[in-house]
Amino acid sequence: MRVTLFGASGLLGHELVHELSGTGRNREQDQLTAFSIEDADLRDHARVRNLVRDSRPEWILLLAAYTDVDGCESNRDLAFAVNCDGAVNVAEAARETGSRLLFVSTDYVFDGGKRSPYQTSDPRNPTSVYGESKARAEQRLLEILPQVCIARTSWLFGHAGKCFPATILKLASTRPEISVVNDQRGSPTFTCDLASALVKLCRASAQGIVHVTNSGNCTWYEFATEIVRQSGLPAAVKPVTTAEFPRPARRPAYSVLSPDSLHAYNIHLPDWQDALRRYLASAQVVPAPAVP
Ligand SMILES: NC(=O)c1ccc[n+]([C@@H]2O[C@H](COP(=O)([O-])OP(=O)(O)OC[C@H]3O[C@@H](n4cnc5c(N)ncnc54)[C@H](OP(=O)(O)O)[C@@H]3O)[C@@H](O)[C@H]2O)c1
């Protein structure tokens, strides 16, 4: 596959570059052109257009985004300029070159009011500026490129940047007790597993909305408890409520994404506990011996 990727220096971008360079689990010969913000700001339509025209990709992977969820609340214009208008620039370039586009989206397009996994057909109802900007982008891309593939994911963790397990490991090794919210439920997703699934979706010529997360779900408190347990750190984890830790952006209380759309492509991701084990092993955290 000839692939052009936007967002190369982000958490997921690093993993996809690894995957598509043939150094990851994907051993096929792919021709990758990867851009970071220094090469191309998504807001620069002409630049995006030229880069896509010159690289003539079969697939464009669009991961670049303004992902600071709380920052988006106070920078609404920037959030929409990057996450929506920037995505539209890429989609228009894709249309001109006849390239396929895979856009990475988010569980934040939902309001979190459900108590069973969100299907791809469930209506969008974002409750944050970040979620609004991504939801609007999804709608615009479907208008511009009816064949677009929109891969929604959630709660990413990986090696190439700040993520929840890294924060918990740091806190749990310096404090006797850490407090973590226990009233938001979702599916943690390892960038390594996500990258592999996204490449498979491209090879399968996927289109429409697909939900791509590791299997199973938990609250942030349960996730933190499992991180501490698997890494053998002595810290206690205390459950608290979102109300006790107010943040600028509202988070969905429940954002579990149904895997049905992914299974339709015969792609199955391992459960999040298994993904966490592999993350910790590759982060060289020695797990504690199993307690009988
Ligand atoms: N992280 C999650 O939990 C999560 C959950 C669901 C969906 N997603 C989606 O997954 C995708 C990848 O997320 P991630 O966690 O890998 O994000 P990330 O680490 O923040 O990476 C995003 C990249 O986009 C770049 N970027 C920001 N503004 C840009 C612009 N105007 N033009 C070009 N590039 C720009 C950033 O560059 P700088 O670093 O220089 O700003 C960064 O390298 C995003 O589309 C995100 O919405 C993430």
Image: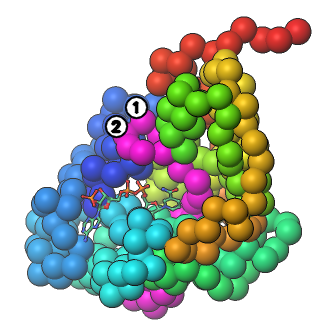
Residue 289 image position (x, y, % from top left)? 72, 8
Q: Nearer the viewer, residue 241 or 14?
A: 241
Q: Which residue is mark 2?
A: 18
Q: Is residue 73 positioned above or below 275 on the image?
A: below
Q: Which residue is mark 1?
A: 24
Q: Is mark 1 within 8 Å of ligand 1?
A: no
Q: What amino acid is at disc 1?
A: Gly
For residue 13, which numbered disc appears in the image? none
Q: What amino acid is at disc 2?
A: His
Segment tinted magenta in the rendering: 136-163
Determine the secondary structure under disc 2. helix
The residue positioned 30% from the left and 58% from the top of the image is: 7
Badge 2 density bin: few <14, some 14–19, many ≥20, Cα 10 Å: some
Q: Is residue 140 visible?
A: yes
Q: Answer with the quadrant where ligand 1 appears in the image.
A: bottom left
Along the horizontal axis of the image, is 82 left or right of 283?
left
Q: Is residue 263 visible?
A: no
Residue 67 image position (x, y, % from top left)? 41, 65
Q: Is mark 2 within 8 Å of ligand 1?
A: no
Give the Cα separation between the discs numbered 2 and 1.
5 Å
Q: Is residue 142 magenta?
A: yes
